[in-house]
Amino acid sequence: MAEHKFETGHNIDFVNTTVLEKTTGYMDRKIKEAVEIKLHPNNFNREEERETGSMPKKHNVERHSKTNHSSFDANYPFKSELRKKKIKELKSKLSGQQSIFTRPVVKCRCATIASLKITHLLAKKKKPFQDGELLKEAFLTGAGCLFEGFSNKREIIMVIQDLQLSDNTVTRRIQVISCDMQTQLKSDLEVCDWFSLQFDESTDISDTAQLAIMVRMVFSDFTVKEELLKVLPMKRQTKGEHIYNTFKTYAMEITLPLHKLSAIATDVVPGMLGSVNGFIALCKKDESFPDLLPFGHVMNVVKKTINSIRAAPLQHRLFKALLGEFEGKHSDLILYTEVRWLSKGKVLARFLSLIEEIKDFLKSKNADFNELSDSCWLLDLAFLTDVADKANSLNLELQGKEKHVAQMRGSVKSFKAKLVLWMSHMKMKSLVHFPSMKKMVGESNFSPSPFVDHLQTLLEEFEKRFQQFTAIEPVVAFFCKSFYLPNRGYRNCCIYWKTHSSKDRRTGNGDFGPSK
C-alpha cells in the first residue's frame, strides 16, 4: 500500500476500511485472497499475488530444484544430448501418470458413442428398446470365442461390459438423437436457399390422424437434401382449416423461413385442394406464404368456368357439340390440375382460344360470368397466358436427359435477359412478344405500368432463385470457352507467341505480353 501511495499519490482511507473475509488456515486465506482479487480487478495487488497458493510459483520451483535435485545440472549438462534424453524420459513418465486420470474419461466417451450408434441401429431397424440388453449379452457370449488367444481379451470383455444398453438408457439415447436431428434440420433450413414441402395425411392404428411433412432443401452448392420435417397428430377433424392451423402453429414454433418456400405438394383430398377452405387455398390467402404473380382472380374464374362446363356430363356433351359446329381446331376444354406439370399454361392457352365459344355457350345457359365481358380481366388473362407459355418453354429447356449446368445456366440467363427486353417493350406499349395481349388489345389503348411491375417482380424472383448461377458463372464460362481471354492484349500475346520466333518477342503496354 505504501508503494502504491508513493507511486500514484492516492490517499488511503483507513477509517472506512471494511473486512471482506476472515479465515484461520493459510491455504484458505490464499484461496480467498485470489477469489477477491479476481472479483475486484481494479486493485493494487501485484501480479504474483493474483495466483492461488496451490499454483506453483517460479521461486518455489527453483528452490525445490536446488534443494532436491542439486546434482541434476552436473550429471546432465545444459544443451547436451544426455540432458535432452533425460528430459524426454521425465516427460514420458509424467504423461503416464496423467493417463491414469484421462484414460477412464476416454473409455467412458467411447462407450457412450458405441451406445448411441447401437441405439441408432435399433431405431432404424424398428426393434424394441429391450433388445439393447440382448445385443450386449450376445457380444459377451461371442467375445469369449472370438478373442480367444488375444493378450487383451480381458480388457475387451470389460469394455463390452461397460456398454450401457438398458431399455431406459436406449430411450434416453433416442431422445438425444432426436433433439440433435431437429437441431441439424433447423440449421439446414436457415442455411438453404430454397425448400419445398410435401404433405400427406393418414390415420394410424389408434384411429389418430397423422400429418406427415417432408421437406426438400436446395443449397448454394447445388446439393439437395430430403428429410422428414415432422409428424403432427390431428386429434380432431382433418378439414383444410384444421390442417392449416396445425401447420401454421408448428411453423411459428420453429420459426420456419416461409419466404424460402418454393412449392407445396399434397394429395388430392378435398381438405387439401378445396378451392375455398382447402389447405392450399388458405395458404394462398396468408401473406406469410410467398406468391409470385398475384393473378388468383384470373385463375379462379378460369377454373370455375371450366368446372361448370365439364362437371355435368350433359353440359359437357352440349359444349363439345357446339365446338363441332364451329369446326375449330380444338374440340374440348382442358381440366386444370395443379399437380400436373405445365398444366396452367396449357389450360390458359386453350381457354383463351375458345373464349368466344365459351361466352356463347354460357349465354345460352343464362350463366352469370361477368368477368368474361370485362376488358381489364380479359387483358390480365391474355398477359398471364403469355407469361405462362414462356415459363413452360423455360421448363422444357431445363428438363431432359444429359443436361449439364452450363446449358441450364445459359437458359436461365437468356430468360432473365428476355425479361428485361420484354419490360422495355412493354413500357413503349409494344406487344410483339405478347401475342395474346396484342390480339386482345387490338387498336384500343391500355396502361402498361401494372404489367411492367409484374415483369419486374418476376425478374427479381428469378434473380433470387438462381443467384447461385451468378456465383459460378466465371467457372462455367471458363469450361465452356477455355481458350477465350477477355483482354485483347493477352489474346494478341497468345497469337504472337504462336506465330513469331523468340528473337522478335518484346514486352510493353501494347499487344505483346510477358512469356508466362
Image: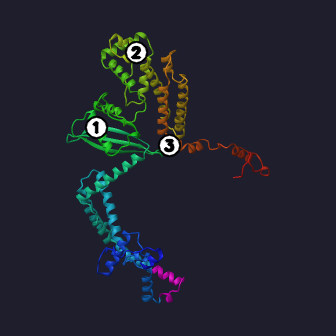
> What separation in Å lies between label 2 and label 3 (alpha carbons)?
44 Å
Q: Amino acid at mark 2?
A: Ser
Q: Earlier in the sequence, mark 1 or mark 3?
A: 1
Q: Of 485 and 157, which appears nearest the observer?
A: 485
- Where, by quadrant of the figure, is residue 479 drawn? top right
Q: Position of residue 194 (x, y in %)?
A: 42, 41
Q: Amino acid at mark 1?
A: Asn
> What separation in Å lies between label 1 and label 2 (alpha carbons)?
38 Å
Neighbours of disc 2 within 10 Å: few (<14), some (14-19), many (20+): few
- Where, by quadrant of the figure, is residue 65 drawn? bottom left
Identify the mark at residue 468; answer none if there is no mark.
3
Q: Secondary structure at mark 2?
A: helix
- For residue 339, side relative to residue 164 (left or right): right
Residue interval drawn in magenta: 72-89
Neighbours of disc 3 within 10 Å: few (<14), some (14-19), many (20+): some
Residue bearing mark 1: 245
Residue bearing mark 2: 373
Q: Earlier in the sequence, mark 2 or mark 3?
A: 2
- Report the mark closest to the observer, 1 or 3: 1
